[in-house]
Amino acid sequence: METTARTTSLLPARPWNGLRVLDLFCCAGGAGMGYHLAGFDVTGVDIQPQPNYPFTFVQGDALKYAQEHAHRFDLVHASPPCQYYARVTRWRGNADSHPNLIAPTRTLLSTTGRPWVIENVPGAPLRADFLLCGSMFGLRVRRHRLFETSWHAAQLTAPCDHRALLPFAHKDERAFADAMGCTWMTNKEGRQAIPPAYTDLIGRQATVELLAHTTPAAA
């Protein structure tokens, strides 16, 4: 596995909370940016090259890396590929041609001894500790996503308001990525991203949980 340090001075400033998060299946870093804003140091892992990932990046198998290194982190976030459960796959393709990694991801993370978060699309077999929408954060996008947490988090957000939102369309991908807050990504990378606001919220709740109940990870 190849590790690349990419943290730059161009990242949004925020106080460090003293904690580290492992961002599995990280893509271009929508989730990672939210954890950064919440105060975490971020390391991402993805099987594909991610030249625009803005934090320390490891190219390799996410679950294998977690099995070997999760104990070094205070929190583990995983966004397994969503195509198996996505509605668009059922409309336009074959779900069985895509990996179904939620169950093996949950099983592995449950053995690490570290708090964890799994994110995926509605319809995925996740307990909905959070069901987040961009409209809850004042964003002009819907982008519903489920989050299951090891500590059974409680959702404390406003209800959705789907009026006057920007619909996702390939011709408007740049505008959609920017509306999510993923301005550093390419148009194509934005297709697989989530708004950083989602994991900023979850990261802040996780920080309270971690600092109150969890032994810090070893270096």
Image: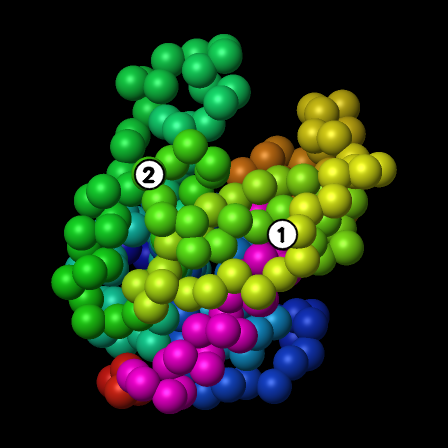
Instruction: Residue at 33% x, 68% y: name it.
Output: 151
Q: Position of residue 197 (x, y in %)?
A: 63, 60
Give the CA distance from mark 2 to mark 1. 21 Å
Circle number at residue 195: 1
Q: Position of residue 147 (x, y in %)?
A: 44, 52
Q: Is residue 79 magenta?
A: no
* Mark in front: 2 vs 1: 2
> In this picture, is 172 found above or below 132?
above
Identify the magenta region.
194-214
Quarter occupied by the N terminus: bottom left
- Quick one: 98 or 86, which is closer to the camera? 86
> In this picture, is 82 found above or below 180?
above
Circle number at residue 125: 2
Of the residues shown, which amino acid type is indicated by label 1? Answer: Pro
Of the residues shown, which amino acid type is indicated by label 2? Answer: Pro
Please tell me how crowded label 2 is: few (under 14), some (14-19), or many (20+) other residues with Cα within 10 Å: few
Instruction: Residue at 15% x, 63% y: name it.
Output: 111
